[in-house]
Image (tube, rainbow, N blue to C red):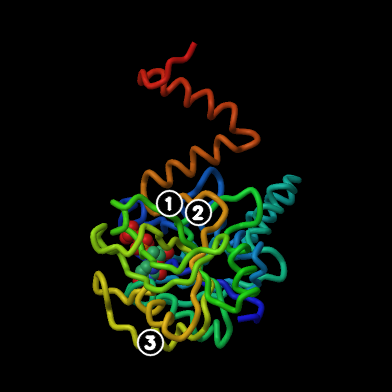
């Protein structure tokens, strides 16, 4: 896989049931961390990694995602007239010049594997990235996907982001068994979707970043519905192991699971604390709130 990775797939056609009732009308990917929706963080990461074609797999309830990346004529005119040039740039640059967005529909939520398969006509026969926007990964250096793309291009292998999780959480993740790690990467020897702690081959969990060989597509096509009745990407990756080297990669950075309430709250707080303009105020009210609760003894 020494070909350049240009295409990034964002499967955003899930139902987002954990955030109901908000997700009745607001797609999960549009929930903001401070002032930017989750999808923007994932798009920025893909663009930073060198992707110039962003493929969004959506459904009929996700118009807000397409609208967000569309041009906002009236708003732009108003900002221009008002001389608000900085804001105008922010609005215009949700997707930078030279990068194109393509929308593909998944007509039925048949699972993550099926959503990735829906992108096949646009991806074609080249290696590509997959990013799940509800996994927000924050790093001061190169983003997680940029790190993975470097490794994929250097080795010619597929690369999957992984993270050690507490053993009791294995049933929330795809879990991998690997050969010994060299630096940050190890060859995957087995992958299982959401095993119980007793069945899990390790506590190394897959998180939402993948660089995949196009050989995954015929394997996805042949994948029967698995856990939860859904076509699982994990099952197709398991079949890919027999054909190709697939590396587990321990990325540099902090991951927030924004598909859960507590993960979204944590990401919001950590971003506020790190924010140039908000940090001091955020620290102040957090101290007050914690001391009111009697958790923190403030002098
Ligand atoms: P999740 O397992 O987080 O499901 O999907 P979900 O529907 O988004 O959220 P909950 O669990 O109901 O709260 C993982 C990723 O796969 C996408 C989702 O949009 C999310 O990015 N996905 C899942 C699809 O695009 N299509 C599907 O059929 C299923």
> Which x, y percent locates residue 132?
47, 63
The residue lying at 50 percent from left, 71 percent from top is: 247
Which residue is label 1 attached to? 258
Disc on the earlier residue, 2 or 1: 2
Instruction: Give the structural element (helix, strand or loop) at label 2.
Output: strand
Callout 2–callout 1 Cβ contact below 8 Å = yes
Judge whether 221 appears above or below 41 on screen. below
Q: Give the quadrant of the N terminus.
A: bottom right
The residue lying at 32 percent from left, 64 percent from top is: 201
> Which x, y percent locates residue 62?
43, 65
> Which x, y percent locates residue 163?
45, 56
The residue lying at 52 percent from left, 84 percent from top is: 214
Instruction: Give the structural element (helix, strand or loop) at label 3.
Output: helix
Tell me the number on the disc at residue 221. Answer: 3
> Which x, y percent locates residue 167?
32, 52
Task: Decide: few, some or many residues near mark 1? Use Cα within 10 Å; few <14, some 14-19, many ≥20.
Answer: many
Spatial CA distance of label 2 from label 1 is: 7 Å
Spatial CA distance of label 3 from label 2 is: 29 Å
Which residue is label 2 attached to? 136
Q: Quadrant of ligand 1?
A: bottom left
């Amino acid at each position: 896989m020494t070909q350049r990775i240009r295409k990034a797939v964002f499967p955003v056609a899930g139902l987002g049931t954990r955030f109901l009732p908000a997700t009745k009308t607001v797609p999960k990917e549009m929930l903001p961390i401070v002032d930017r929706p989750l999808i923007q963080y994932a798009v920025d990461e893909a663009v930073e990694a060198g992707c110039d074609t962003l493929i969004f797999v959506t459904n009929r309830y996700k118009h807000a995602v397409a609208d967000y990346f569309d041009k906002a004529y009236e708003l732009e005119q108003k900002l221009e007239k008002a001389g608000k040039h900085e804001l105008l740039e922010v609005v215009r640059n949700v997707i930078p010049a030279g990068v194109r967005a393509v929308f593909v529909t998944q007509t039925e939520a048949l699972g993550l594997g099926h959503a990735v398969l829906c992108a096949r006509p646009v991806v074609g026969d080249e290696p590509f990235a997959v990013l799940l926007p509800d996994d927000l990964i924050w790093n001061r250096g190169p983003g997680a996907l940029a790190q993975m793309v470097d490794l994929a291009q250097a080795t010619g292998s597929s690369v999957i982001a992984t993270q050690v999780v507490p053993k009791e959480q294995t049933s929330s993740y795809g879990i991998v068994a690997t050969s010994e790690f060299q630096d940050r990467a190890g060859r995957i020897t087995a992958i299982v979707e959401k095993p119980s702690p007793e069945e899990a081959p390790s506590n190394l969990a897959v998180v939402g970043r993948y660089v995949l060989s196009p050989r995954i597509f015929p394997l996805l096509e042949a994948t029967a519905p698995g856990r939860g009745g859904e076509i699982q990407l994990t099952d197709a990756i398991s079949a890919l192991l027999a054909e190709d080297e697939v590396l587990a990669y321990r990325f540099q950075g902090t991951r927030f699971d924004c598909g859960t309430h507590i993960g979204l709250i944590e990401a919001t707080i950590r971003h506020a604390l790190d924010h140039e303009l908000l940090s001091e105020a955020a620290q102040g009210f957090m101290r007050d709130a914690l001391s009111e609760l009697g958790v923190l003894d403030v002098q």
